[in-house]
Image (cartoon, rainbow, N blue to C red):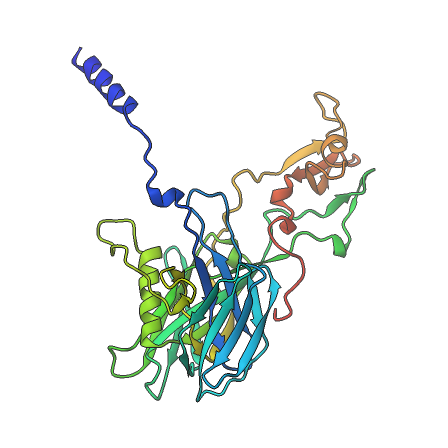
C-alpha cells in the first residue's frame, strides 16, 4: 500500500508540471550582427550582415540584404563593398595606407545607419605552422605563431576545412531505366569532397608572457570516426591580429556563447562592440570591426598518417541481395527496386552461383553508396 501511495503522489506531482518558456526564447527583438574584418592587404574584405532571431524560431539564417557598405579612412577616402550573395558584402584587395585609421559604414534598406569606431591597422604576423596531436578520441589540430617585435599579443583565428571521402559501399552499376549497366567514369559517385567552416571562437593571447609566442593553441578537434579523415583532409587557417579592446570583445562573446550552461561557468555579461546605430544609440549591435592584414596557411592530412580508424557510417547501411527472380516468391527485385529512375536501391555488383548466369545484384540504400548526397564531385582547385 505504501508503494501504491507513493506512485499516486508521483503521478499527481508530474501532472501538475507546466512547461516554462523563458521570455528570451520567444523575444521578438532582432539585432544587427556584423561579421568580418577590414583587410588592409591585397586579399578581399568580406563582411557578413544578418539579424538575430528568436530561439523558438524555425529560421536558421537571417541575412540582411540590399544594404550599402563602405570602408572609410580618417582622411575621407571611401571604398565601397558589393553584395555578392544574400548578406555577404565584398571588396577586392584594398591595399590600405597602414598609417591611417578606418571604419565601416552600413546603411540598411530601411534607412538605418551604423558606424564602427575608427581603428588603426594592425599587421598580423605569419602563421609559423599547423600541426596535430593524435588523442584517444581523434585528432586535435593546433597552430603556432609568434611576433618577433612583441607588438601583436592578441590573436584570433578561423578556418575553412575540406575533405575527400567515400561512402561505405561503391556502386559500380547504374540503371538506364530499362536495365542495369556499368557506370562510366563521369557517373562515379564513390569519391566526393565535403567542406565546412569554423563555428567556434578561437582566440589566444601572449600578453602575460615575456615573448609574443603562441604555442600549440587548439584550433579544432576531429573525432576518429569522422568521414573528414576517411581519405584526406585539408584546413585553411586564417589569423588576425587584434587590439586589446577587440580581444576583450571576442573573449566576452566566447564566454556568452560557448561557456555557459553549468554552475561553474561564467555568468552572462553585456557584450559591447564598436559598432553603433547612429539613428538609435541605444540599439545593441553585435560585432567588432578590426583592420589588419590577414595571414593564412593550409595543410593536408592523409589517412596514411593516422592510426587505423573506422569511419562511423550510418547504422542502417547494409548490403542485401536483389534477385531477378527471388527464389521463394519469384518477384523481380532488381526490376522493382533498382531499374526505376530514381532507383530505390543502388546496384553494387552482380552475383551468381557457379555455372549460372547473373542471378541479381547486391544493393544498398542511396545514402550508403552515393557520396553526392552529402558532398560534391568537383575537386577543389587547391587540392593535391
Tell me where residue 98 appears, x and y as whole percent. Answer: 45, 87
Quadrant where the N terminus lies? top left
Residue 307 sits above or below residue 180 on the image = below
Residue 338 location, quadrant = top right
Residue 42 sits above or below residue 191 on the image = below
183 or 33: nearer the viewer: 33
Tell me what residue is drawn at x 31 percent, y 69 percent.
248
Quadrant where the C terminus lies? bottom right
| Residue that lies at the very extreme toward the top in this rendered image | 1
Tell me what residue is drawn at x 67 percent, y 34 percent.
321
Tell me where residue 7 appears, x and y as whole percent. Answer: 23, 17
Tell me where residue 45 appears, x and y as whole percent. Answer: 53, 74
| Residue that lies at the very extreme toward the left in this rendered image | 2
106 or 83: nearer the viewer: 106
Tell me what residue is drawn at x 57 percent, y 75 percent.
80
Residue 341 location, quadrant = top right
340 or 281: nearer the viewer: 281
Amino acid at each position: 500500500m505504501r508503494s501504491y501511495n507513493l506512485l499516486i503522489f508521483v503521478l499527481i506531482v508530474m501532472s501538475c508540471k507546466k512547461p516554462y518558456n523563458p521570455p528570451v526564447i520567444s523575444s521578438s527583438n532582432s539585432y544587427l550582427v556584423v561579421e568580418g574584418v577590414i583587410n588592409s592587404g591585397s586579399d578581399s574584405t568580406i563582411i557578413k550582415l544578418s539579424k538575430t532571431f528568436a530561439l523558438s524560431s524555425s529560421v536558421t539564417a537571417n541575412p540582411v540584404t540590399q544594404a550599402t557598405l563602405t570602408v572609410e579612412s580618417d582622411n575621407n577616402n571611401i571604398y565601397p563593398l558589393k553584395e555578392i550573395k544574400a548578406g555577404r558584402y565584398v571588396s577586392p584587395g584594398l591595399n590600405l595606407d597602414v598609417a591611417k585609421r578606418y571604419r565601416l559604414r552600413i546603411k540598411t534598406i530601411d534607412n538605418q545607419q551604423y558606424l564602427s569606431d575608427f581603428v588603426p591597422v594592425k599587421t598580423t604576423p605569419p602563421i609559423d605552422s599547423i600541426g596535430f596531436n593524435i588523442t584517444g578520441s581523434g585528432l586535435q589540430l593546433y597552430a603556432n605563431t609568434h611576433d618577433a617585435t612583441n607588438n601583436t599579443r592578441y590573436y584570433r583565428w578561423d578556418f575553412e576545412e575540406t575533405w575527400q571521402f567515400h561512402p561505405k559501399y561503391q556502386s559500380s552499376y547504374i540503371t538506364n531505366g530499362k536495365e542495369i549497366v556499368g557506370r562510366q567514369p563521369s557517373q562515379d559517385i564513390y569519391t566526393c569532397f565535403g567542406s565546412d567552416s569554423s563555428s567556434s571562437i578561437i582566440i589566444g593571447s601572449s600578453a602575460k608572457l615575456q615573448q609574443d609566442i603562441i604555442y600549440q593553441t587548439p584550433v579544432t578537434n576531429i573525432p576518429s570516426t569522422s568521414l573528414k579523415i576517411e581519405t584526406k583532409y585539408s584546413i585553411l587557417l586564417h589569423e588576425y591580429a587584434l587590439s586589446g579592446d577587440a580581444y576583450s570583445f571576442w573573449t566576452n562573446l566566447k564566454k556568452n556563447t560557448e561557456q555557459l550552461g553549468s554552475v561553474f561557468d561564467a555568468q552572462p555579461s553585456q557584450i559591447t562592440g564598436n559598432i553603433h546605430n547612429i539613428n538609435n544609440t541605444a540599439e545593441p549591435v553585435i560585432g567588432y570591426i578590426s583592420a589588419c592584414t590577414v595571414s593564412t596557411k593550409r595543410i593536408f592530412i592523409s589517412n596514411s598518417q593516422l592510426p587505423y580508424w573506422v569511419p562511423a557510417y550510418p547504422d542502417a547501411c547494409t548490403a542485401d541481395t536483389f534477385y531477378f527472380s527471388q527464389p521463394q516468391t519469384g518477384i523481380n527485385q532488381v526490376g522493382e527496386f533498382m531499374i526505376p529512375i530514381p532507383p530505390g536501391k543502388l546496384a553494387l555488383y552482380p552475383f551468381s552461383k557457379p555455372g549460372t548466369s547473373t542471378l541479381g545484384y547486391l544493393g544498398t540504400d542511396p545514402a550508403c553508396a552515393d557520396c553526392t548526397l552529402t558532398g560534391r564531385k568537383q575537386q577543389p582547385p587547391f587540392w593535391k
